[in-house]
Amino acid sequence: MVASVIVFLLYIVLLVAIGIVTYMRTKSSKDYMLAGRANNKWVTAISAESSDMSGWLLMGLPGAAYSMGFAAIWTLIGLLFGTMLNWMISANRLRVASEVYDCLSVTEFFEKRVNDTKGTVGLISGIAVLIIMIINSSAEIIGSGKLLNATFGLDYSTGIIIAMFIVIVYTFLGGYMAVSWSNLFQGSLMFFVMLLVPIIVVFKMGGLNDFVATMSQTEGFFHWTNGLTGFGAFSTIAGGIGIGVCYFGVVHVLTCFMSIKDSSEIKDSTFIGTTWVSITSYAAVIIGMLGAFLFPTIADPEQVFFQMGKDFFPAGLLGLFAATVMAAILSSVSAYIIVATGAVSTNIVKHFIKDLDDKKTVMISRISVLVIAVLAYLMSLNSGVVFAVALLATALLGSCFGPLVLMSLYTKNVNKTGAIASILTGLIVVIVWYYSGLSNYIYEAVPGMVISAIVLVVVTRLTGGPSAESVAKYEEFEREIAARKEK
């Protein structure tokens, strides 16, 4: 146990050190909110994917595969294609847009894209991001409480306090620069551990023969839809693929696109990011399926990865497993908090205080980190299922912002009223769908995104289309895109 504690403490010390170093390098609001648009292709790719996958990768996804068996393949397909398409379709254009429109956050881009001089789009999108990121953060903090309880026997409430303290320290100090570099380290740790664990476990099992023979007797385990047919099968497939469609609105990943130093490196980042996701998510599904065979009576399937660590690896490595799970959790919590902070400082506060200078913006951002973290902590006091909470937050992001991001980047036909209507529609549809119980049949992101997209198109047309100023700026953006392709 002593060795495990030492390994875990070293991990925490390294995160704090990153916060201190990046604090000394943070000189402006652009540094704090967007890492000075100076991240290289490795930092951008791994930071984007580790912040996206979160504790869901090591807890939620293995837990789902434990319960669903081979049917988890649809979630895997949704993750892989969603990640790849988001990089291919959104990354380059959003990076260029961040310069053309001079914006430090995705919500600020929405505001400037539709030429909203009153800041209403920024305010509404900022509030939506703030609410969703608090929900997202609470899901991850729940995971940290479960982790530290299982690892070191700490009380759940003590575990979430420790996790929040760690993430507050380095995010408060270094902002997005600290988040990016800490996520490079944490994402690399997650990658290598996730790659090795199923290989070593299968080796120690003596192969897969016993696993296949035993689990073949479990009804639906090796079935594409877990034995379901008709509408049940359709719901399983649509739900898994629907997760991938949400990616176009996942603002913490989109922010990573905006932070890369040179848009010409995005092609390499696309390969790095999709490779990272492919290997880690595939490993997570294998771990969950193996766990159903190895630990058929486990109380919480979301603990299957950690249980493997305890049963198949030396006790001294327990701290490494704890650090890996905590890395997955904190890489996302820090990204959620800094994105929510950006929405507060660039949209919500500036909507009411117009003359904020750079120094005051950074100060407000740091205060926001503290407030948002406390709110997420309070929401996490009621422990829940990481997978379910994370799916809801993802659906909200995809439905509120996915259609708006795509249309803002690829067509001039977007205006202020359409943007507001689309955001609010996505929010309302997902919440109503989820709490009415309809998500038991179709994942709430599917109707949320479809209806939000229709509302965006229809309301924009009915309210006169885009303004002349908005069209002129969009044409400037298109010229810049074309100019960079010629280089």
Image (tube, helix red, strand yellow):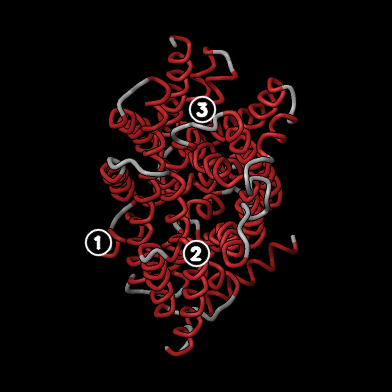
Which of the two discs, 2 and 1, sits closer to the camera?
2
Q: Where is residue 366 in the image (x, y as percent from the top left)?
A: 31, 43
- The residue indicated by pointer 2 is 441
The mark found on residue 306 in the picture is 3
Q: Which amino acid does label 3 sit on?
A: Phe
- Tell me if label 2 and label 1 are in contact, CB under 8 Å: no
Instruction: For mark 1, give the secondary structure.
Output: loop
What numbered label is drawn on residue 353? 1
**Residue 240: percent from left, percent from top:** 58, 56
**Label 3 neighbour load within 10 Å: few <14, some 14-19, many 20+:** some
Left or right for 296, reference 200: left
Q: How far apart are marks 2 and 1 (CA)?
A: 45 Å
Residue 46 seen from this side: yes
How far across and down, in percent of the image, does residue 384 sit? 36, 43
> Decide: marks 3, 1 in contact (CB < 8 A)?
no
Q: Quadrant of residue 363?
A: top left
Question: Residue at coordinates 27% horizontally, 60% vertically from top-left?
Answer: 355
Q: What element carries label 2?
A: loop
Q: Position of residue 31 (x, y in %)?
A: 44, 45
Label 2 sits on what residue type?
Tyr
